[in-house]
């Protein structure tokens, strides 16, 4: 959820990041989840009919930044670059729904360990965001998986071996070149203390890229990007 600055509450292993920098410069944010790389196995998402939100915000956290201060976190063992933080229902007016029901999470959380190795985080994402999607828990996380797999990580970042720096607009350009369906207004960069924390992509309910509207990139002139550890 992109909520003004720092509004997320997480499982113990991730709480520190949420309170420090996870929640982004645009309306939503939290902390990383699990690694899931781009794949040709792109499931067709179940479209929520009549759900009370306008679009999804896909948050891909830059894992090296989180893992710098949380080296023992579950998702840090794979030394990933971008990992799924969440797929968050958003409204065009800049608001967002959250905690919409007490519906139970997936019957087999481990079946989504490829995108959420920490089941506590999976439950948090379901309760806070997934319950507002109009989908069952299984359909919501299947849709989240499809969203992650629809995005190709630019080689410049997926193969990063040493720290680099670049303006937020250049990071956006890397993503639009690697993903022809994306446009510059469908991608936003999140940063904290001038370090990259996440890339966010705005998607409609069928997971097609759309303009982000109120979601904006951070205002840093240059963003530092540490490599995986």
Image: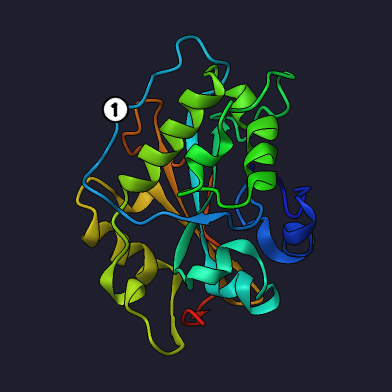
Vertical placement of residue 14 versus 1, above or below: below
Quarter of the picture holding the N terminus: top right
Residue at image position (57%, 62%) is: 75
Image quadrant assignment for residue 18:
bottom right
Q: Secondary structure at mark 1?
A: loop
Vertical placement of residue 39 versus 62, above or below: above
- Whole-percent x and y of residue 87? 52, 39
How many discs mark residues in the rendered view? 1
Residues 193 and 134: in front is 134
Q: Which residue is mark 1?
A: 44
| Residue 2 seen in this snapshot | no
- Whole-percent x and y of residue 107? 58, 26
Residues 111 and 45: in front is 111
Residue at image position (24%, 54%) is: 179
| Residue 34 seen in this snapshot | yes
Vertical placement of residue 212 versus 205, above or below: below
The type of colouring in the image is rainbow
Residue 170 as seen in the image, left or right of residue 6: left
Label 1 Cα neighbours within 10 Å, binned few <14 / some 14-19 / many ≥20: few
Residue at image position (32%, 62%) is: 153
Residue 41 as seen in the image, left or right of residue 2: left
- Whole-percent x and y of residue 19? 79, 60
Residue 27 as seen in the image, left or right of residue 162: right
Residue at image position (43%, 32%) is: 142
- Whole-percent x and y of residue 102? 74, 19
Residues 156 and 114: in front is 114
Given the current orientation, which residue lies at the most extreme top position?
50
Given the current orientation, which residue lies at the most extreme bottom position?
162
Image quadrant assignment for residue 119:
top right
């Amino acid at each position: 959820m992109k909520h003004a600055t720092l509004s997320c509450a997480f499982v113990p292993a991730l709480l520190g990041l949420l309170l420090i920098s996870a929640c982004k410069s645009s309306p939503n944010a939290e902390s990383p989840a699990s690694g899931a790389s781009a794949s040709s196995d792109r499931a067709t998402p179940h479209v929520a009919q009549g759900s009370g939100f306008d679009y999804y915000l896909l948050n891909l956290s830059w894992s090296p930044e989180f893992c710098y201060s949380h080296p023992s976190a579950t998702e840090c063992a794979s030394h990933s670059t971008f990992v799924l933080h969440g797929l968050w229902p958003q409204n065009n007016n800049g608001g967002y729904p959250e905690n919409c029901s007490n519906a139970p999470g997936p019957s087999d959380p481990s079946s989504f360990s490829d995108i959420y190795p920490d089941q506590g985080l999976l439950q948090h994402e379901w309760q806070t965001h997934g319950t507002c999607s109009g989908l069952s828990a299984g359909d919501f996380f299947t849709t989240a998986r499809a969203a992650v797999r629809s995005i190709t990580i630019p080689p410049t970042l997926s193969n990063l071996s040493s720290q680099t720096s670049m303006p937020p607009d250049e990071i956006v350009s890397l993503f639009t070149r690697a993903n022809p369906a994306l446009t510059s207004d469908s991608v936003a960069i999140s940063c904290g203390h001038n370090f990259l924390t996440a890339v966010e992509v705005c998607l409609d309910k069928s997971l097609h890229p759309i303009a982000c509207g109120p979601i904006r990139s951070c205002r840093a002139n240059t963003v530092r990007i540490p490599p995986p550890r």
